[in-house]
Image (tube, rainbow, N blue to C red):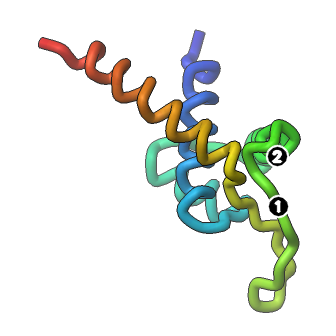
Amino acid sequence: MDGREFYSSLIRLHILHHAAQAPIFGLGIIEELSRHGYKLSAGTLYPMLHDLERKGYLASAEARDGRQTRRFYSATELGKRQLEDAKQKVKELFGELFED
């Protein structure tokens, strides 16, 4: 096992976190995630974005960004609630993982 199945959930939390702060778009979030050590292709990221949108955690809309039209994703109220719930669970888990 190479850890990808574990990282998938962390990546989804990263996406929700950033989408709750400001609208995100594919290439921008790929670059942001790469700063955290995740190397994602568009073929990996977009199915995640579409899945999060289908489940109601993200909403998307097309908007002009300079000369390009991009699809921007924002966290919905459901997504924000899910993120807050996940943050509590992550905090508890990290407390256990890093106990002395």
Q: Amino acid at mark 1?
A: Ser
Q: Position of residue 6 (x, y in %)?
A: 56, 20
The image quadrant where one finds the N terminus is: top right
Precedes in sequence: disc 2 or disc 1: 2
The image quadrant where one finds the C terminus is: top left
Q: Amino acid at mark 2?
A: Glu
Q: Residue at x 55, y 18 (%)?
A: 3
Name the foreground residue: 79 vs 1. 79
Which residue corresponds to mark 1? 60
**Is residue 59 shown left or right of residue 79?**
right
Q: Are marks 2 and 1 in contact (CB under 8 Å)?
A: yes
- Asked where in the image residue 39 lies, by quadrant, the reply is top right
Answer above or below: position of 47 versus 86: below
- Asked where in the image residue 51 lies, by quadrant, the reply is top right
Name the foreground residue: 15 vs 83. 83
**Is residue 26 shown left or right of residue 19?**
right
**Which mark identifies residue 53?**
2
Q: Position of residue 14 (x, y in %)?
A: 54, 45
The residue sitting at the top extreme is: 1
In what element is the residue under mark 2? Answer: helix
Answer above or below: position of 95 versus 28: above
Q: Residue at x 28, y 13 (%)?
A: 96
Name the foreground residue: 81 vs 86. 81
Distance (Cα) linking label 2 and label 1: 7 Å
Say how many tags the image has: 2
Q: Position of residue 64 (x, y in %)?
A: 82, 84
